[in-house]
Image: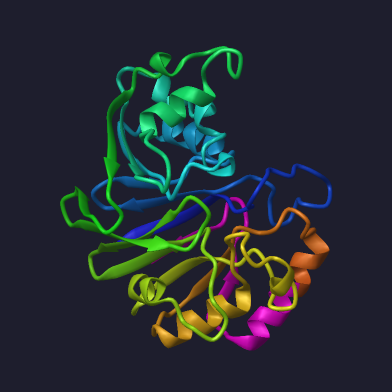
Amino acid sequence: MVCTVKFWGVRGSIACPSPEHVVYGGNTSCIAVTTEAGIVVFDAGTGIRSLGREIIGHGLAHAHLFFTHTHWDHINGFPFFAPAYNPAFRLDIHGPKQDGSPRGIQHVLMGQMETPNFPVPLAAMRGIVSYEDFEVGSIFSPYDGVTLRTAPLRHPNGACGYRLETGGVVVAYITDTEHVPGTPDENVLFLMRGADLVIYDCTYTDDQFPTKIGWGHSTWQEGIRLARAAGAKRLAIFHHDPEHTDDIMAGIEAEAVRSWTGVVVARDGMEITL
């Protein structure tokens, strides 16, 4: 094994636990990439609660958590990430500096846990050992043999895309980005180039997109166009619209797979080994 990618939350905008969202899942964004050196977590939507249980069950002692941005659906599971309350656990947190906001990642996470928003303060999370606010475009080495490259995405208040490289394997995590029809995003192509797996914001379809311009999201058809142009091997359709029920998602999956054999549709609990 070089690395394993597990999808803990695949939904965008708001969690949608309902009988119509069982097959593909209703938790919001959270991805865990387990490398031979350690675990890298992307975003802390509601899916991070279940990830926390697995970390405890496996006795893991350390993780790096990288945020794409701090809109609610990407942070609102964080207060329920149980390992962070354990002083024996070590959690390093990294957040991109965002447009128009002087507040760093620690202050944002603290704000959602302040009275009267939440009964337990951020200070109770004694497993957190560091907070880092970084400029998008920075390069990280969270573990030996693991490199993270970053690039800006088109989203209200800004967002950060990631390219994780380890042992010759590349995983691109690109969510909350809006494309310009007919103009491939060079930042996105850079992150995707030659990737073994691309996780891309496919909230809408091309038919829906004209009424969603300015909302900061893309389509599964654009994801395929970009992945193929970048020479990526696989595309995971991700950040599903909460209005897309299991029946709608099944239709999208069937059409997407017909369009390109490299497509998979992300589901809560799905695991891909690279």
Q: Nearer the viewer, residue 144 or 29?
A: 29
Is residue 226 placed above or below 216 in the rendered structure? below
**The magenta stretch spans residue 262:** yes
Residue at 61% x, 63% y: name it: 214
Residue at 55% x, 34% y: name it: 77
> In this figure, what is the number of numbered marks?
0
Q: In which quadrant is the N terminus drawn?
A: bottom left
Indicate the position of residue 101 as horizontal and vertical percent values: 42, 40
Q: Nearer the viewer, residue 270 or 243?
A: 243
| Magenta-highlighted residues | 252-274
Q: Is residue 1 visible?
A: no
| Colour basis | rainbow
Q: Nearer the viewer, residue 138 or 41?
A: 138
Residue at 84% x, 47% y: name it: 19
Indicate the position of residue 245 as horizontal and vertical percent values: 80, 58
Q: Nearer the viewer, residue 216 or 162?
A: 216
Indicate the position of residue 59 as horizontal and vertical percent values: 37, 31
**The magenta stretch spans residue 81:** no
Residue at 53% x, 73% y: name it: 179
